[in-house]
Image (cartoon, grey):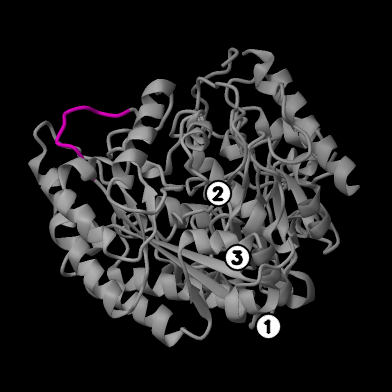
Amino acid sequence: MSDELLVYPRRDYGMDHDRYAWSMLQDRPPVAWPDGKPLALWINLSIQHFPLSGDKPPVAPPGALTMPYPDLRHYTLRDYGNRVGIYRLLKLMEHYQAAPSLAISGALAERYPQLLERLAKTSSEWLGHGWNMLSMHAGEIDPQIEAQWIHNTRTALEAFTDQPIVGWLSPGRIQSANTPELLVKNGFRYQCDWVNDELPYTFRTGEGEMTCLPSSLELDDVFVLTQNLHSEDSFAQQVIDAADLLINEGREQGGRLLSLNFHPWLVGQPHRIRTVREILQALLVDRGDAIWHASPSHIIAAAQA
Amino acid sequence: MSGTTQHAELALYDYSPYERRPKIEWPNGARMAFWVAPNIEFYELDPPFNPHRTPWPHPYPAVPGYSIRDYGNRVGHHRQMAVLDKYGVRGSISLSAALCEHHPEIIALCAERNWEFFSHGIYNTRYTYGLSEDQEREMIEDAMATIERAVGQRPAGYLAPALSHSNHTIDLFAEAGGLYTCDLFHDDQPTWVKTRSGKPFVSIPYSLELNDTIAYVVQKMEPRRYGEIIRRAFDQLYEEGAESGTVMCIPTHNYQVSCPHRLRAFEEALEYITGHSDVWVTTGREIAEYSLTHLRDQIGSHSEVSA
């Protein structure tokens, strides 16, 4: 076997790449959230379009269609989120005066303008979430195609909202080697795909720095409910256990962040929406004194203040 | 695979039925030796291609897999360490040796707590698979020397990187001066291991069943159920230990057990275990040294020549 297996080109201090600096959360200066709250809460809703297509991307995102074309069962189950689930979630969020950010597939601007007009009436911050759930920023994807997806997503979403789109969550939290550079070139200032921390940090690209605001995968509803196959009650319990631990740490060590990501096609189902209600009740009401619920841009600004 | 046979019945230890074994007495009359083995690993973002095993499920850059493991070192380590401190447990670290170079801060924190460092290869993205015997010897020695330079003590134990083995792995590690292996899951007590050099060498029960990554990623357990199975395992081994003398290990990963939704289950299990008397809370090295010094007959060394 070749000697390459025993050659270690990046075996040195810090990371084995140049994307960000090595540091331990507990060694950094403590973060202070507004009003001395120990825990910041970021809620995101991922509003996704899964095209009815027989194409198989190089990497399938969670929720991807799986059956031979036409996969009506999964297409319509995902479409349910954009017809029913999102409205159920919006009603619940309004009841709790929650302000989730919205990561949106750009293709929905063309496909469901009514939905985007409705979303524009909320106070939510929007993030680009790829053109659709087949446009995977993965592997050997042509950088020109990838750049076009990013540009088109931003342009399509900005046609519906006055706010600039500066945040990005890739489908499946997957990136190609070029994604960070292409995001910066297209005006994005933060991305959420590298889930290697619990606080925002500086991410380097060949086009200048951006921020990474990690969006927790381990507490993502799709990950817990459809990959781990945990019960709805366990999901709520896990979120609450996480919040309690982070509140304690936040009091002792400096501000912490809990990030939650919900999918309308999953938790917008009638048997699951109650779990979202329980989570919002536990966090925003029962632990309201300890939690600062804010948009991603406000959280980044406060963390970097 | 450089001429090695692909079929060979394992001959590393003799068969020994659990019933009617001579009893093991742990120090101070303890009925169980209990240890926690935090794996502290470094996975490379861009490892060389190895045709025998692919490290990442995604093409380069494998952001999801890489990120969560980095999270373990950046965020999870301190969190797990605080819980182990709270219950008076010294970790026995299964260490990717290159972490001594990448993240010396973590090494320093563990060294000042007098934790044990044992070898887990260079990186967890570099496998034993495909190495010649000489190459594997070089890799094992590199890891031993790197850890010894960093902490001042040569490692006593080995868990092969990513549990990748050859038919020489345990022989080579014994010849490099190792005392124990964590790679064998055949027993709840230490077992004398027959290596080709005949050096005193022992298998110490580690555990795949209680390993947090197996529990969370393979078995997809709910966090509180993980805490529950740890307590059930403890109850059984503690009860039996009064008659047999048992070993219990909880192998952990700072990117699994330390996630904020999971740490509580681990903490409650540790609180439960350390709340019992007659439990020797110790390290892998101390169990190995005690076994090789005081328990030769009990662990099956009768057929071996002392080195």
Q: Secondary structure at mark 1?
A: loop
Residue in front for this viewpoint, A59 or B303 = A59
Residue B277: which numbered mark, if any? Answer: 1
Would residue B215 be found to the left or right of residue B264 on screen? left
Q: Is residue B287 magenta?
A: no
Amino acid carrying label 3: it is Ala
Task: Tell me which chain the residue with mark 1 is part of.
Answer: B
Nearer to us of marks 1 and 3 is: 3
Residue at position x 44%, y 33% in the image: B58
Cβ–Cβ below 8 Å for labels 2 and 1?
Answer: no
Residue at position x 79%, y 31% in the image: B142
| Stretch of the chain drawn in magenta | A49-57
**Quadrant of the rendered image containing residue A51:** top left
The answer to whether residue B279 is visible is no
Residue at position x 36%, y 63% in the image: A124
Task: Tell me which chain the residue with mark 2 is part of.
Answer: A
Q: Residues within 10 Å of mark 3 (few under 14, many from 20)?
A: some
Would residue A110 be found to the left or right of residue B163 on screen? left
Amino acid carrying label 1: it is Ser
Residue in front for this viewpoint, B37 or A282 = A282
In 3D space, how far apart are the residues under numbered discs 1 and 3 (Cα atoms)?
48 Å
Q: Secondary structure at mark 3?
A: helix
Q: Which residue is mark 3?
A: A302
Vertical order, B292 against A209 (above or below): below
In 3D space, how far apart are the residues under numbered discs 3 and 2 (Cα atoms)?
14 Å
Q: Which residue is mark 2?
A: A212
In 3D space, how far apart are the residues under numbered discs 2 and 1 (Cα atoms)?
47 Å
Residue A106: which numbered mark, if any? Answer: none
Cβ–Cβ below 8 Å for labels 3 and 2?
Answer: no
Vertical order, B55 against B222 (above or below): above
- Residue A76 locus on image (x, y percent): 11, 48
Amino acid carrying label 2: it is Cys
